Amino acid sequence: MSSDTQTLSTAEPTTATDAEFAARAEAFGNRMLEILNDGFLTLMVSIGHQTGLFDVMSSLPPATSADIARAAQLNERYVRECLSALTVGRIVDYEPDTHTFALPPEHAAALTRAAGPENIAAFAQYIPLAASVEPAIIDCFRHGGGVPYSKYGRFQQLMAEESAAVHDVALIDVTITLVPGLPERLREGIDVADVGCGSGHALNLLGREFPNSRFIGYDFSEEGVAAGRAEAAALGVTNTRFEVRDVTDLGVSNQFDLITAFDAIHDQAHPAQVLRGIAEALKDDGTFLMVDIQASSNLEDNMEHPLGPGMYTMSTMHCMTVSLALDGDGLGTMWGEQVATRMLREAGFASVDIEHVDADIFNSYYIARKA
């Protein structure tokens, strides 16, 4: 074989490899452009939700930006520019001959408040919230530590909106029925605590539905506790109480028939200690109903998780870092069912069952008992 032939034979696979690399690089570059466009578009979706733009458009026929702005009581120039972004983003439809915009019904089903827990637009608000602490998070990457809860402004409000959408639809008719016999016991009258109660909406719904039971909510947020008390007064609910308390130390033993925690445990500085305190506070025949993020504890199992990128990002930007800001364990949002089950058993729960609810794509529902 001549040297020329040798050179030619070795050059062919190199060329093929270069072509494959170029194709992969181009595909990834296009993917990055999609990510950037969708990231910017998320801000428009957040604004569309907060201003009520989507709700108004869902009730209108195709209309000009001026007509839509008038109906929504918004500034036309801002509405027009936002609608332009939503048009090229394939979220609203546009008719150039009449200069009219329309929100297709199938899109409204994921973008309006009428959609309840199916309203994806509400979750877009977390993107600008997370971005607001980006400089502080970058500093944590370099120096460790965490960003405290107090830096997150509207977080309490967004969590209240998110949880209310699910609780209003499912709490009474679905969630509590996951525990056999629980609705009947609540009607008869039992003692209930909600750990990390936030704005207290779930507890007030339960208090209104089951007047013979006694409910107390614990949260370290004074804002959340104040909101819970105000809502109870507005609803005329007299069997709920709210206390500002670090739930790491509940300080009670054998007191409650039921303890609930709605998306609260993974945020705690020391979740194992909180779980042990919950087990101690429960009566021997009591039940702990824990609602927390639906995921695997194994990264490889979450590759097809429909919310995987968002949940790991929110963990970095909020859930993990607020724990680390308190010198906590930094458990993170995606602690997953395997770790959650293990930690519940280590806390003193002899049995742990996991259920799922169709109205809530975000969470797993843990039913834990000491006996």
Image (cartoon, helix red, strand yellow):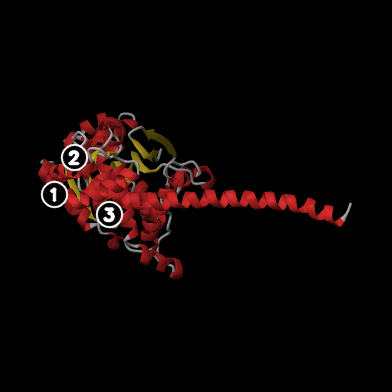
- Name the spot of residue 193 as percent of width and height, x first: 26, 45
**Disc 3 to disc 2, how far (Cα)?**
25 Å
Where does the image place residue 306, in percent across and percent down from the top left?
A: 43, 41
Q: What's the amino acid at mark 2? A: Val
- Circle 2 or circle 1, nearest the eye: 2
Along the viewing direction, whichever of 173 and 146 lies nearer the viewer: 146
Q: Residue furthest bottom?
A: 143
The part of the image, by quadrant, that contains residue 329 is bottom left
Crowding near the residue tagged with mark 3, few <14, some 14–19, many ≥20 C-alpha atoms within 10 Å: some
Q: Which residue is found at the position 28% from the left and 62% from the top?
A: 150
What residue is shown at x 25% (from left), y 59% (from top)? Answer: 153
First-in-chain label (3 vs 1): 3
Q: Which residue is mark 3?
A: 155
Which numbered marker is on residue 322?
none
Labels 3 & 1 near each other (Cβ < 8 A): no
Q: How many marks?
A: 3
* Residue bearing mark 1: 230
Of the numbered discs in the image, which one, if any, rests on residue 56? 2
Residue occupying the point 73% across, 50% down? 13
Image-based side of 239 in relation to 326, left or right: left
Mark 2 or 1 closer to N-term?
Answer: 2
Label whose residue precedes the other's in the sequence (3 or 2): 2
Question: In x, y percent, where is residue 120?
Answer: 32, 41
Residue 284 visible in the displayed image: no
| Type of amino acid under label 1 | Ala
Q: Which secondary structure lies at badge 1?
A: helix
